[in-house]
Image: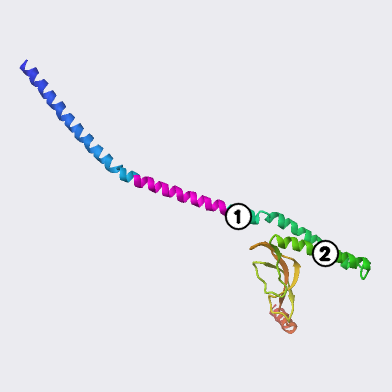
Amino acid sequence: MEKDKKNLNENIEQNSEQEEVNETMSSNNKSESEKEFSPEEKIIELEDKLTRSFAEMENQRRRFEKEKEDAFEYGGFAFAKEALNLIDNLERSKKILEDDEKLKNSEALKKSLEHFDIIYKDLISIFSKNNIKPIECLNKKLNPNFHQAMIEIEDESKEPGTIIQEIQKGFTIKDRLLRPSLVGVSKKPENKDEKKQEINEKSGDK
């Protein structure tokens, strides 16, 4: 009997000790948790998240405004590029009439060309009102940003790389290139004597 009473007391003591250990651990964990997520730290974390969210919203707003502005300014880019075919066809038709031997020096040709010029000026005027402007290129230095050289033409009166022929007119829309001017540029005339000597030297080497 005494033995059983002793064992019971020992169990009670062990349980009490275990409860104390558990309470201590729980208290420690609680203090650590409170330390990690204190109200001040939670407020700082929320403020940081809010700041990032506002920054992202502002970036999105700016992107949207830029896209809207570009759409307004350049929305007709594709249409404008297609519309240039009107000017190309007009110039081709005018050239065909001018080269027609039967019509040369005739009153009919003169009147037709006058009408073509009026239509051409009207088209250029409409384009200009919509910020579509022709690129002036003749007698200017070749600029790869606006001109595309198609041929080289010997011309000793011009500095090499000067545009002396406009094959197809180029255009810009606002500050953007719509299409480049197709041009012919000057090059230095070849010295025939030097060329002949070079050919002879090559023939001699063979």
Mark with earlier residue (1, 2): 1
The alpha-carbon separation of the residues under discs 1 and 2 comes to 34 Å
Q: Is the magenta stretch mostly helix, strand or loop?
A: helix
Q: How crowded is mark 2: few (under 14 residues within 10 Å), some or many (20 or more)?
A: few
Q: In x, y percent, where is residue 45?
A: 36, 46
Quarter of the rendering occupied by the N terminus: top left
Residue drawn at x 82%, y 64% as measured from the top left: 118
Display coloring: rainbow
* Quarter assignment of residue 39: top left
**Region rendered in magenta:** 43-66
Q: Name the residue under label 1.
A: 69
**Element at badge 2?**
helix
Horizontally, is 35 left or right of 135 in the view? left
Quarter of the rendering occupied by the C terminus: bottom right
Q: In x, y percent, where is residue 71?
A: 63, 53
Q: How crowded is mark 1: few (under 14 residues within 10 Å), some or many (20 or more)?
A: few
* Whether residue 157 is situated above or below residue 115 in the rendered picture: below
Residue drawn at x 90%, y 68% as measured from the top left: 110
* Whether residue 182 is situated above or below residue 27 in the rendered picture: below
Q: In x, y percent, where is residue 137?
A: 71, 71
Horizontally, is 150 left or right of 13 in the view? right
User: Number of labelled discs?
Assistant: 2
Q: In x, y percent, where is residue 25?
A: 21, 35
Q: Does the magenta stretch include residue 65?
A: yes
- Point out which mark residue 118 bears: 2
